[in-house]
Image (cartoon, rainbow, N blue to C red):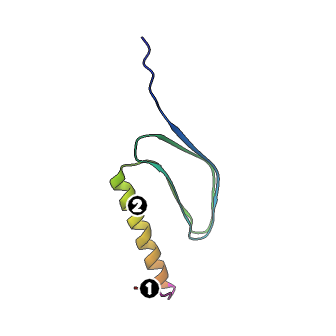
Protein backbone atom coordinates (compact mmCIF):
# COMPACT_ATOMS: atom_id res chain seq x y z
CA UNK A 1 0.00 0.00 0.00
CA UNK A 2 0.88 3.64 -0.33
CA UNK A 3 1.81 5.64 2.76
CA UNK A 4 0.54 9.20 2.87
CA UNK A 5 2.06 11.77 5.17
CA UNK A 6 0.66 15.07 6.34
CA UNK A 7 3.53 17.30 5.23
CA UNK A 8 2.97 21.01 5.44
CA UNK A 9 4.74 23.57 3.29
CA UNK A 10 5.14 27.23 4.24
CA UNK A 11 5.98 29.42 1.25
CA UNK A 12 7.15 33.01 1.62
CA UNK A 13 7.51 35.04 -1.58
CA UNK A 14 8.67 38.47 -2.72
CA UNK A 15 10.45 39.43 0.48
CA UNK A 16 12.13 42.86 0.41
CA UNK A 17 14.19 44.06 3.33
CA UNK A 18 16.47 47.05 3.81
CA UNK A 19 19.04 48.52 6.20
CA UNK A 20 19.48 46.77 9.53
CA UNK A 21 16.30 44.71 9.29
CA UNK A 22 15.84 41.07 10.21
CA UNK A 23 13.49 38.52 8.72
CA UNK A 24 12.88 35.06 10.10
CA UNK A 25 10.76 32.35 8.47
CA UNK A 26 11.43 29.09 10.24
CA UNK A 27 9.70 25.93 11.35
CA UNK A 28 10.58 24.25 14.62
CA UNK A 29 8.12 21.39 13.96
CA UNK A 30 9.86 20.09 10.82
CA UNK A 31 7.51 21.67 8.27
CA UNK A 32 9.00 22.60 4.92
CA UNK A 33 9.88 26.30 4.66
CA UNK A 34 10.49 27.86 1.24
CA UNK A 35 11.48 31.48 0.58
CA UNK A 36 11.44 32.78 -2.97
CA UNK A 37 12.55 36.04 -4.53
CA UNK A 38 14.42 37.59 -1.61
CA UNK A 39 15.67 41.15 -2.10
CA UNK A 40 17.99 42.19 0.72
CA UNK A 41 19.94 45.44 0.84
CA UNK A 42 22.11 47.26 3.33
CA UNK A 43 22.75 45.11 6.37
CA UNK A 44 19.48 43.18 6.16
CA UNK A 45 19.61 39.61 7.46
CA UNK A 46 17.26 36.76 6.68
CA UNK A 47 17.04 33.35 8.36
CA UNK A 48 14.89 30.62 6.89
CA UNK A 49 14.42 26.89 7.12
CA UNK A 50 13.92 24.10 9.62
CA UNK A 51 15.66 24.57 12.94
CA UNK A 52 15.26 23.36 16.49
CA UNK A 53 13.61 25.51 19.12
CA UNK A 54 17.00 25.80 20.84
CA UNK A 55 18.65 27.05 17.63
CA UNK A 56 15.81 29.54 17.12
CA UNK A 57 16.32 30.92 20.63
CA UNK A 58 20.09 31.22 20.05
CA UNK A 59 19.41 33.03 16.75
CA UNK A 60 17.12 35.55 18.46
CA UNK A 61 19.69 36.06 21.24
CA UNK A 62 22.44 36.59 18.66
CA UNK A 63 20.40 39.12 16.68
CA UNK A 64 19.52 40.96 19.90
CA UNK A 65 23.22 41.15 20.78
CA UNK A 66 24.02 42.53 17.30
CA UNK A 67 21.36 45.22 17.78
CA UNK A 68 22.74 46.21 21.17
CA UNK A 69 26.29 46.44 19.82
CA UNK A 70 25.13 48.45 16.83
CA UNK A 71 23.22 50.88 19.05
CA UNK A 72 26.23 51.30 21.34
CA UNK A 73 28.59 51.96 18.45
CA UNK A 74 26.17 54.53 17.05
CA UNK A 75 26.09 56.27 20.43
CA UNK A 76 22.40 55.65 20.98
CA UNK A 77 20.87 55.18 24.42
CA UNK A 78 19.45 51.65 24.58
CA UNK A 79 17.86 52.09 27.99
CA UNK A 80 20.34 50.05 29.99
- What is the distance, in whole Å, between disc 1 and disc 2 at their CAs? 22 Å
| Front disc: 1 or 2 | 1
Q: Residue at x 40, y 47 (%)?
A: 28
Residue placed most toward the observer, 20 or 56: 56
Question: Decide: marks 1, 2 in contact (CB < 8 A)?
Answer: no
Q: Measured from the top left, where is residue 53 in percent x and y?
A: 36, 52
Dominant SS in magenta? loop
Q: Measured from the top left, where is residue 38 in percent x and y?
A: 62, 53
Element type at mark 1: loop
- Residue 59, label in figure: 2
Q: Earlier in the sequence, mark 1 or mark 2?
A: 2
Q: Residue furthest left?
A: 54
- Residue with the mark numbered 1: 79
- 71 falls in the magenta region: no
- 75 falls in the magenta region: yes
Q: Measured from the top left, where is residue 30 in percent x and y?
A: 41, 41
Which span is picked out in magenta?
74-79
Height in image: 60 above or below 27? below
- Residue 28, label in figure: none
Amino acid sequence: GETLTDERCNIFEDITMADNSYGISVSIVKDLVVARRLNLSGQARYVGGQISDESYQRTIDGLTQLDLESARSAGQDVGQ
